[in-house]
Image (cartoon, rainbow, N blue to C red):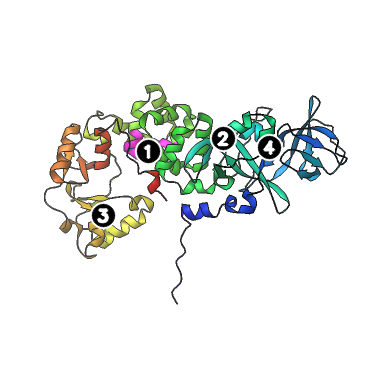
């Protein structure tokens, strides 16, 4: 029997599985903004204080549990643990005990005060791929535990929160984002120490580089640094390659030199060289010094070419195959390269002394007879330009040959790099920026 193919959940399926799609949850929301200033009563119904904030712990759970309340009693802020809360209503809180811990409240590791640390601060919606600020947050009781379940971004909610007290306790969830789809960011606690997240939203890693670039361009400086750290070096490098040049340069200037050098060194060589070229000499030298010497040497070589030349626009990510290599050997070579091999659209074919013989598209390679020599698959007139050629010659070569890329060669005809048509389009239309697919077409 044929085994069924298991597919990763699409964004549509992930959204449909969110907790707020359950009517039992969406119908029992408690507004955090509405709780602030609400009376806290003991068993006898006497008011002992007012809610100053709601504290949750986010350490690996998609819906952080409430660990307690910060209660204002006179001029002091006291701690009331979640176990002491008998009833958490929309307009008041009832305690199960008349006893209060008279020590001043202190923030514990991993705990976040929602009104102070989260409302009005930047976060990311990984389902909608957008940066937002929450006008309100919603709690709900799930299996006996009060949890943070959503963030409201509606303008009407903001008006409710800023309006009279009688309005604040009634949720108006017209535009609510499920908390499982949210990537929050750190905020310094009252002692100045950052409240660091121990878990990045796993759906961040499903976003495309262009989507991550959009987020990075919209976030503030601390949030950008934290998002990059959550992504990992390769994902961060892919995202940076998709950013607008001005935004990218600002980001590189903001990041610590060691982190910047690591990410830039992982970018495609042409993209890395373009970014470095825009930096001031002192910052550029600092980054190159912090890189692996071999990578730095390659980038220095690219920077030596004039920006408007073929050498200044090429990437050095080139795979050269000897003309006598078989198609089967060439395919295996690409497979051995892993993800880097999968991204190649063309390969160069060279003779015994390394001179360019021709250019071979990856699709042609995988459709050809495995026993053929790759030299038999290329023509006698490869599309190439010299490294010193002006950029206009690159455009002419691509247009004349109707080719998706052009090989850049040295004075002896040996391949140095490649320029793809996408980069030519970007260079010719700088005012439009990088072309990205509309979000409505993404899944």
Q: Earlier in the sequence, mark 1 or mark 4?
A: 4
Mark 1 to mark 4 CA distance (whole Å) = 45 Å
Q: Is residue 7 left or right of residue 196?
A: left
Residue 156, numbered label: 2
| Depth order, front residue of 326/16 | 16
Which mark, by number, is residue 241? 1
Secondary structure beneath dot 3 equals helix
Per the image, the residue denoted by label 3 is 362
Estimate the spatial distance between the alpha carbons at disc 3 and disc 4, rounded to whole Å: 62 Å
Is residue 24 inside the magenta stretch? no
265 left or right of 427? Answer: right
For label 4, count other residues whose C-alpha is less than 10 Å away and answer few (under 14), some (14-19) or many (20+): many
Residue drawn at (79%, 24%) of the image: 75
Residue 123 is situated, as x and y percent measured from the top left of the image, at 54, 37
Circle 2 Cα neighbour tier, 10 Å, few/some/many (<14 / 14–19 / ≥20): some
The stretch in magenta equals 262-273
Q: Are marks 1 and 4 in contact (CB under 8 Å)?
A: no
Residue 272 located within the stretch drawn in magenta: yes
Which dot, 1 or 3, sits closer to the camera? 1
Q: Residues within 10 Å of mark 1 (few under 14, many from 20)?
A: many
Which numbered disc flags the more N-terminal residue, 3 or 4?
A: 4
Badges 2 and 3: C-beta atoms under 8 Å apart? no
Q: Secondary structure at mark 1?
A: helix
């Amino acid at each position: 029997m044929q085994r069924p193919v298991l597919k990763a959940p699409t964004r549509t399926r992930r959204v449909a599985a969110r907790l707020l799609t359950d009517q039992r949850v969406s119908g029992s929301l408690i507004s955090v903004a509405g709780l602030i200033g609400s009376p806290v009563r003991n068993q006898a119904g006497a008011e002992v204080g007012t809610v100053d904030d709601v504290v949750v712990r986010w350490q690996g759970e998609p819906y952080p549990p409430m660990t307690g309340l910060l209660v204002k009693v006179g001029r002091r802020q006291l701690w009331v643990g979640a176990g002491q809360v008998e009833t958490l209503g929309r307009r008041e809180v009832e305690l199960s005990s008349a006893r209060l811990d008279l020590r001043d409240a202190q923030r514990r590791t991993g705990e976040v005060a929602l009104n102070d640390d989260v409302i009005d601060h930047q976060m990311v919606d990984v389902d909608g791929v957008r940066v937002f600020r929450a006008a309100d947050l919603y709690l709900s009781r799930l299996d006996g535990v009060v949890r943070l379940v959503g963030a409201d971004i509606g303008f009407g909610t903001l008006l409710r929160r800023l309006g009279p007290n009688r309005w604040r306790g009634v949720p108006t969830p017209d535009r609510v984002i499920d908390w499982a789809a949210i990537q929050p960011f750190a905020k310094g606690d009252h002692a100045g120490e950052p409240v660091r997240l121990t878990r990045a939203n796993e759906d961040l890693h499903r976003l495309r580089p262009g989507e991550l670039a959009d987020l990075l361009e919209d976030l503030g400086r601390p949030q950008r640094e934290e998002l990059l750290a959550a992504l990992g070096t390769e994902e961060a490098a892919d995202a940076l390659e998709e950013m607008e040049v001005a935004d990218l340069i600002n980001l590189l200037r903001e990041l610590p030199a060691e982190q910047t050098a690591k990410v830039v060194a992982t970018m495609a060589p042409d993209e890395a060289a373009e970014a470095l070229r825009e930096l001031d000499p002192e910052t550029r030298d600092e980054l190159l010094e912090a890189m692996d010497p071999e990578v730095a040497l390659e980038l220095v070589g690219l920077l030596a070419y004039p920006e408007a030349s073929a050498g200044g626009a090429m990437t050095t990510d080139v795979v050269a195959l000897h003309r006598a290599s078989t198609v089967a050997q060439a395919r295996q070579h690409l497979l051995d390269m892993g993800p880097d091999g999968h991204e190649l659209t063309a390969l160069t074919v060279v003779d015994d002394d390394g001179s360019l013989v021709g250019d071979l598209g990856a699709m042609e390679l995988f459709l050809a007879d495995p026993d053929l020599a790759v030299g038999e698959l290329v023509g006698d007139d490869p599309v190439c330009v010299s490294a010193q050629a002006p950029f206009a010659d690159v455009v002419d070569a691509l247009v004349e040959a109707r080719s998706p890329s052009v090989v850049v060669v040295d004075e002896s005809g040996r391949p140095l790099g490649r320029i793809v048509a996408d980069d030519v389009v970007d260079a010719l239309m700088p005012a439009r920026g990088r072309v990205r697919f509309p979000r409505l077409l993404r899944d």
